[in-house]
Image (cartoon, helix red, strand yellow):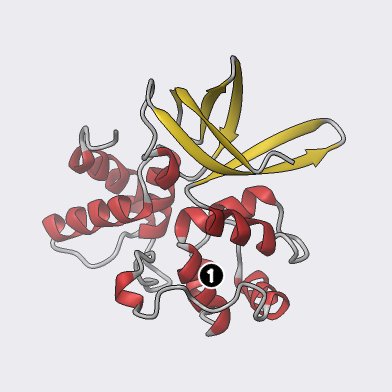
Amino acid sequence: MIASLSGTVSSVRLDRAVLEVGGVGYLVHATPATLATLRVGEDARLATSMVVREDSLTLYGFADDDERSVFETVQTVSGVGPRLALAMLAVHTPDALRRAVAGPDIPALVRVPGIGTKGAQRIALELGDKLGAPTVADPAADAAAPAAHPADDKRDQVVEALVGLGWNVKAADDAVATVLAQAGVDVVEAADVAGALRAALRVLGGQRG
C-alpha cells in the first residue's frame, strides 16, 4: 500500500492531480478542498489510500492522515465505495462527519450527493462509534458544510455543480447565498437551477486557484 506521496505537483484538474515522485507521475484523486492547496511546480505531500480492483489500481489523496482514516473507515459500510467516501469528505470535514454520525444528523448526511435518507440511516447505524470522537470540541472551529436547506430549495444542486467544477463547498454555498440575496429570494426553485448556476459562476469569477 502507498500510504503517502511527497513530490512535485505536475498538474491539477477538477478532481485529480499528478504528483511526480522520483521521475514517476502518480495520478491521485482528491476533494476540491485538497486540490485547492496544490500548486503546479511546487512540492506537496498527500496522505494516500490505494484501492485495488481486478482491472485497476486507484490512488486517493488527502490533506492529512485523519482524512485518509475517515475515508477508509466509511467504506466499511455496505454500499459505500471510494467514490462515495470521497464525496462525503468533499461535503463534510472529518469532524463534521463524526458529529453527523454520532447525532445522528441524517439531513447532514443526505447533503452528500448519492446518499438518500435510507442510506444515511444505514451509514449512521453501521459506523456507530468507528470514527471516534471529534478532534475539535467546538463545532464553530470546524469548517463544516453549511446547514441543510428546505426540501423544496434546489440550491444544493447548484452547490454540487460548482463543487464538480472545482470550487470548495463553502465558496460554492457562499456564492449561491449571494445570488439569492441579490435576487431577493430565499430558495432556488427547480426551474431556476440553471440560471442560479450561471449567476453563481459570475459571482465566483476567477476566485478558483
How many numbered tags mark residues here? Answer: 1
Tell me the quarter of the picture where residue 57 sits: top right
Q: Position of residue 102 (x, y in %)?
A: 56, 82
Give the residue at the far bottom of this rendering: 103
- For the N terminus, give its image quadrant: top right
**Position in image of residue 185 (x %, y %):** 19, 64
Closest to the observer, 103 or 109: 103
Residue at point 47%, 48% (across, down): 63
Q: Is 21 displayed left or right of 201 in the figure?
A: right
Q: Position of residue 10 (x, y in %)?
A: 46, 20
Write down the residue under mark 1: 109
Q: Position of residue 135 (x, y in %)?
A: 46, 73
Report the residue at 45% width, 62% height from top: 93
In this rendering, the answer to whether 69 lies above or below 33 is: below
For numbered disc 1, what is the local secondary structure? helix
| Res 165 → quadrant | top left
Q: Residues within 10 Å of mark 1 (few under 14, many from 20)?
A: many
